[in-house]
Amino acid sequence: MTVPESARQRAAQLRKDIEFHNLRYYQLDDPLIADAEYDRLMQELLALESEHPELRTPDSPTQRVGAPPVQAFAEVRHSVPMLSLDNAFSDENVVDFGRRVSQRLGRDDLAWVVEPKLDGLAVSLTYEQGLLVHAATRGDGQTGEDITANVRTIRAIPLRLSGKGWPDCFEARGEVFMPKQGFQALNARALAAGEKTFANPRNAAAGSLRQLDPKVTATRPLSFFCYGYGLYPDNRLPATHSALLACFRSWGIPVNPELHVVENIAACIAYYRDLLARRSELPYEIDGVVYKIDALAERETLGFVARAPRWAIAHKFPAEEATTRVIGIDVQVGRTGALTPVARLEPVFVGGVTVTNATLHNADEVHRKDIRIGDTVIVRRAGDVIPEVVKSLPELRPPNAMRFVLPGRCPACQAEVEILEGEAIARCSGGLYCPAQHKEAVKHFASRKAMNIDGLGDKLVDQLLEKQLIATVADLYALRAEQLAELERLGEKSSRNLIEALERSRHTTLPRFLYALGIREVGEVTARTLAEYFRELEPLAAADEETLQTVPDVGPSVARHIYTFFRQPHNLEVIHRLLGSGIHWDPLPERPADTVLPLAGKTFVITGTLDSLSREEAKARVLALGGKAVGSVSKKTDYLVAGAEPGSKLTKAQELGIKVLDEAEFLSLSESGGDAP
Ligand code: 9MJ
């Protein structure tokens, strides 16, 4: 059967459109169409090709996922060796490298290409007549593996080049990697399916690319940046690396937008610092930056030694992962009683510091990751994030390795440990009587976003409690400089500074004070909302759970914590003493004092679904006009606002003879400023 010309033309157009959208998405990071629209184009092409198999060309985007599994990868000999890079671990190494290069070339006015060093897998792509024909791993640099079918599934890599002017045959080389977001999603999927997770994006990229079944690779969120070339006709090479990559980019081969040309080694190091500071914000992991001589003729002069070129160097970032051994698992008790297992480690240098402890999050996590005392583990410390144990290496497990057992009693106060249903977290039930919880509560009270007592750090809190200079946070404000001066490492001057900081902290804000109290589930944002709603401490402390739940974003659980907190005599006593010792705050910006708010004294219940606003918004409106919004109907209710499907509250209101407003009536009431309909 011959293929109708219209079908042939439509297929060609679809292929072109799809590759164009790939380019917008992967190279320009600026898609023009939604994912669903892209999928629709792909479906149309698939349908056409299935009707007319002759239309199924090797460069069709539908062919990215088609190849059958293989038994093993074929070997490929690289026509030009795939080099690796020498490493520099300090500025000094880099300066020495720059000096050596300048000496060899007899000049020091050299332009450098600087680029991120991606942590993925190096591959070489061969294009013939503009079509991707082979893809190979680096292997040992001379011989790699043929991973063409897998690489074809990576949408960032064009199967057919766009633009014009490419040589008949050439190799583009670069890194296949897995962006952080895709990595997290992949691991989340694996976790949900009870499958093994990958330790890091590099392993995930390598594992995905070395799949024997390309259909598996096709489901993995891989991407690619080109940073070099292999085989290339001499007479077609431009003068510089940066010009060649600009050509590649114009043909649709992705090149990292962070790649720049700079004038000297000092600028290379400045680039390193800039990228190190931005490391965590980049959408992919990098383990350093690479500096390369831009002029290709000078590269030729320099040549290479062993497996690395003399014209380039990788300036490595401090490693974020290292292996070490777990020598014990302690259990720490947090401010809210949460028990956190913490691995004690043989000291290891990672992320730029020596790490001796790493969080294991919770007991479930320890068991899921099967981390045992005695195990060799991978520890990760990225940026300022607290170090964590990524995984154990069971192959290296000694026979006497011990499993972790969560204690049944709190290690600090011996109170029973509770595990609430549906929570992964085990908690000490000792409350503030638990010295560990209490200590954390004091630290929290003093912390920057709470009372902001400058100079009152963790070590000092430990000492104040141990030496019994304070029993509760209320005692802080009775401290005298002479008492403090006796503490370890606290001279006269620091003591005075601390007293002054305490003095300054007396003048605070209601949101800070509420946050500092450390009520469960009351973070900074909730503290602010509560302060704005109640304006003062007394009405908040007096509020019942129902009233608390009328505050935006306060659900039953937070309401219960707040209610319970203010019913503990111990807490009330501490608050009383704090206020007695001079803690005060400015009133919140007042609603105009002389206006009597139109809904003052009126109680509303809002039920059912409203068309033009949510129930929360309706409540906020009532509050703004001075009224009260509560959750259930009683004799004290003045108005029931009933939206669609109001349920039992409407029946009850009718029984009690309470005025019922529909949405329109409510809106006109709130907009008119309260003249009751
Ligand atoms: C990576 N991994 O990002 C090179 N690399 O150049 C960059 N690797 C390289 N360049 C020559 N950006 C050999 C390897």
Image: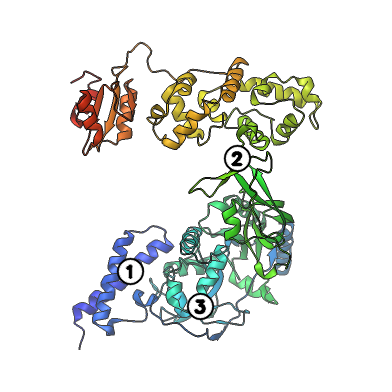
Q: Amino acid at mark 2?
A: Gly
Query: Which residue is depicted at the point 61% across and 49% down?
Result: 385
Callout 2 environment at 10 Å: few (<14), some (14 to 19), or many (20+)?
A: many
| Mark 1 Cβ and ligand 1 under 8 Å apart | no
Give the CA separation, mark 2 to mark 1.
55 Å
Question: Please, is residue 312 above or below residue 470 in the view?
Answer: below
Give the CA separation, mark 3 to mark 2.
59 Å
Q: Are marks 3 and 2 in contact (CB under 8 Å)?
A: no
Question: Please, is residue 424 above or below residue 58 in the view?
Answer: above
Q: Amino acid at mark 3?
A: Glu
| Residue 418 picture quarter | top right
Question: Please, is residue 361 above or below residue 623 in the view?
Answer: below
Q: Are marks 2 and 1 in contact (CB under 8 Å)?
A: no
* Foreground residue among 103 and 527: 527
Q: Which residue is mark 3?
A: 171
Q: Amino acid at mark 1?
A: Ile
Query: Which residue is depicted at the point 70% across and 69% down?
Result: 396
Question: Please, is residue 600 above or below residue 184 in the view?
Answer: above
- Which numbered mark, 3 or 2, is in the foreground of this view? 2
* Foreground residue among 666 and 370: 370
Circle number at residue 337? 2
Callout 1 environment at 10 Å: few (<14), some (14 to 19), or many (20+)?
A: some
**Residue 460 image offset from top left, x and y in percent:** 73, 32
Quadrant that contains the N terminus: bottom left
The answer to whether residue 563 is visible is yes
